[in-house]
Image (spheres, rainbow, N blue to C red):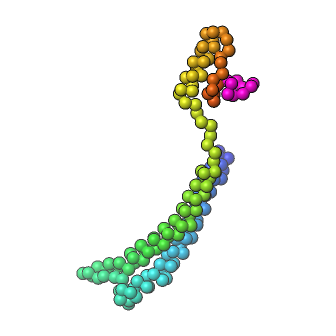
């Protein structure tokens, strides 16, 4: 039971996910610090400064639109960095891997299979060996000693 749990934990996807969560958490802390230390004060200064910068007060209700704008800018910064530093490089790597692969063997077409079956049936009826056909999957095309 413990070996199965160990295999689960050490599987590549789980370890990669754990690393991504840790890095994401650290990056979020950096972006939050940037937003709280620089963007929010900058928005407060632009919107009138003071205690109520970036805020509307309507009937004693406080609408902190400056904090919302800061959060949106923080989200856009995070999304931009993730896209350019993670998504694009991974897509480029996957494109290289896919382009580098050679195509596997091509399956015979229905016509080729039917021609081969016809030739084998004729040979069985005549009692003579089948004449080699030009198909890829015929006995003659497979080479000597092939089944």
Pick out the residue farthest to the left.
59
Task: State the image quarter where residue 142 is shown.
Answer: top right
Q: Quadrant of residue 103?
A: top right
- Rendered-image quadrant of the N terminus: top right
Work out which quarter of the rendered image holds the C terminus and state it: top right
**Please, is residue 119 above or below residue 46 in the view?**
above
Residue 107 showing in the rendered view = yes
**In the depicted structure, whether residue 75 falls above or below residue 147:** below
Q: Position of residue 16 (x, y in %)?
A: 61, 58
> Outermost residue toward the right?
145
Residue 3 vertical position relative to residue 115 in the rendered view, above or below: below
Total residue callouts = 0
Q: Is residue 51 visible?
A: no
In-front residue for pair 73/7: 73
Q: Residue at x 63, y 26 (%)?
A: 134
Q: Residue at x 54, y 75 (%)?
A: 30
The reply to whether the magenta stretch includes residue 141 is yes
| 56 on left or right of 17 | left
* Percent x, y of residue 69: 39, 76
Q: Residue at x 29, y 82 (%)?
A: 57
**Residue 122 rendering spot, x and y as whole percentages:** 60, 13
Q: Residue at x 48, y 83 (%)?
A: 38
Residue nearest the observer in this picture, 101 or 40 = 101
**In the displayed structure image, the side of residue 143 where residue 29 appears, left or right:** left
**What segment is highlighted magenta in the picture?**
139-147
> Is residue 137 inside the magenta stretch?
no
Judge from the rendering whether residue 72 lies leftward or rightward of residue 1; answer left or right. left
Image coordinates of residue 36 in percent, x first then y, are 47, 80
């Amino acid at each position: 039971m413990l070996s199965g749990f160990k295999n689960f934990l050490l599987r590549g996807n789980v370890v990669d996910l754990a690393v991504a969560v840790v890095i994401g958490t650290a990056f979020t802390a950096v972006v939050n610090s940037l937003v709280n230390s620089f963007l929010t004060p900058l928005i407060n200064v632009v919107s009138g400064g003071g205690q109520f910068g970036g805020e509307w007060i309507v009937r004693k209700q406080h609408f902190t639109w400056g904090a919302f704008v800061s959060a949106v800018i923080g989200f856009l910064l995070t999304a931009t960095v993730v896209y350019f530093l993670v998504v694009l490089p991974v897509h480029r790597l996957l494109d290289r891997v896919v382009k580098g692969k050679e195509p596997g063997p091509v399956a015979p077409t229905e016509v080729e299979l039917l021609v081969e079956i016809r030739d084998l049936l004729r040979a069985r009826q005549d009692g003579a060996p089948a004449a080699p056909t030009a198909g890829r999957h015929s006995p003659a095309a497979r080479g000597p000693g092939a089944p």
